[in-house]
Image (tube, rainbow, N blue to C red):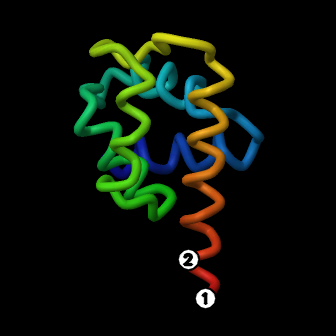
Amino acid sequence: MDEATEDIRKLAADGAGLLAMIEALRDNEGFTLTPLRLLLALDKAFGIPWTEARDLLVLLDPDLRPIGPAGDVEKRFTALLKGATLGRTE
């Protein structure tokens, strides 16, 4: 998972959103993308606790594709990411 973690950190640094990160994880042959593994990767990469990140799953289908507007997913992820970043600086 370390390679996948670094990949999504780099994507985030380049301004990519969650859906782009999910696609990158999906394309990574060394990573099996499941909802749980996504939550664990977000925790490891960004410090977003899986107990909070699981709220993202209600916005995604079982294949981790948005069930509604993609912007809703990205807004929720951005809020979680900001919360995790603030938590690290306190």
Foreground pick, 67 / 3: 67
Residue pictured at 42% horizontal, 49% vertical = 42
Residue pictured at 57% horizontal, 29% vertical = 73
The amino acid on which the numbered mark 2 sits, given as a three-letter code, is Gly
Label 1 close to label 2 by CB (< 8 Å): yes
- From the viewer's perspective, is 4 left or right of 71? left
Question: Mark 2 = which residue?
Answer: 87
- Percent across and percent down for residue 3 are 41, 45
Q: Residues within 10 Å of mark 2 (few under 14, many from 20)?
A: few
Mark 1–mark 2 distance (CA, rounded to whole Å): 6 Å
Residue pictured at 44% horizontal, 13% vertical = 65
- Percent across and percent down for residue 74 are 63, 32
As helix, strand or loop, the secondary structure at mark 1 comes to loop
Question: Mark 1 = which residue?
Answer: 90
- Percent across and percent down for residue 7 are 53, 41
- From the viewer's perspective, is 29 left or right of 78? left
Q: Residues within 10 Å of mark 1 (few under 14, many from 20)?
A: few
